[in-house]
Amino acid sequence: MKYNSNFGHDRGTLKFWNRSSGKVCVLVAHMSSLACSKVYEEAKMLPVLLSAELFRRCDVWPRGFQKLGPTDQNIALYFFPDGESQKAFDLLVNAMMSQDLAMKAVLKNAELLVFTSSMLPMRYWRFQTKYYLWGVFRGKQTAKPRNVVASEERTFAESTCMQGPISPDQYTSSC
């Protein structure tokens, strides 16, 4: 895994608001050294603080990942905890993994989607023995009308992915 921590800010941060504790968890963003110039340009425009919502991963999973899955070549940004947020970060990553969640931040020109490292090939699952988060940019998506299909015709995956964002207080964190 290679990342570059200098992409316009000394470090980029992603805030995650935990309503139950009233605190913000801070994640530090590092650009992948494998990222293309388009990613670099988008990363330079990131605000110092981003707000992200939790969604079911299947609701935001890019179409391009559905057949073969993502690889290290797809990673735009890596996310690690700032020095004070290691425990909260671990709780967030574990909750995202156990509930199959992802984060989405809507930007001016794109969306930033953030996933757990367990969505990558196994050899990329851990950095310094720990799971981590990684992100990709994609064009803004227009809201798609929900397909009204009889529930018995839905697959399990479809039926569990019909809801919107997950409330941040649906997981316990000490942020």
Image (cartoon, helix red, strand yellow):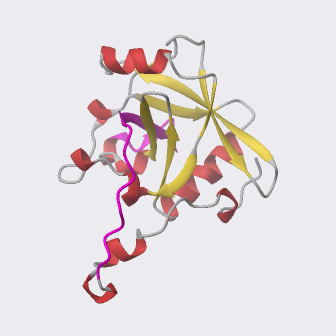
Farthest left residue?
Answer: 67
Q: Residue at x 57, y 49 (%)?
A: 53
Q: As displayed, is residue 15 above or below residue 120?
A: above
Q: Is residue 153 left or right of residue 99?
A: left
Segment tinted magenta in the rendering: 124-149
Quadrant where the image shows the N terminus: top left
Residue 84 visible in the current orientation: yes
Q: Is residue 129 visible?
A: no
Residue 130 coordinates in the image, percent (x, y): 52, 43
Name which residue lies at 38% across and 28% down.
Answer: 76
Residue 100 image-quadrant placement: bottom left
Tell me which corner region of the image, top left, top right, bottom left or bottom right, holds residue 19.
bottom right
- Residue at figure coordinates x 31%, y 70% from the top left: 147
In this rendering, the answer to whether 69 lies above or below 163 is above
Q: Position of residue 127 (x, y in %)?
A: 47, 36
Q: Residue furthest bottom?
A: 152
Residue 154 in percent (x, y) is at: 28, 80
From the viewer's side, name the closer residue of 37 and 73: 37
Please say whether residue 5 is one of the residues in the magenta stretch: no
Residue 128 included in the magenta stretch of the image = yes
Q: How many marks?
A: 0
Which residue corresponds to the image point at 42% horizontal and 20% vertical from the top-left? 42
Nearest the camera: 171 or 141? 141
Task: Judge from the rendering whether residue 97 lies leftward or rightward of residue 71; answer left or right.
Answer: right
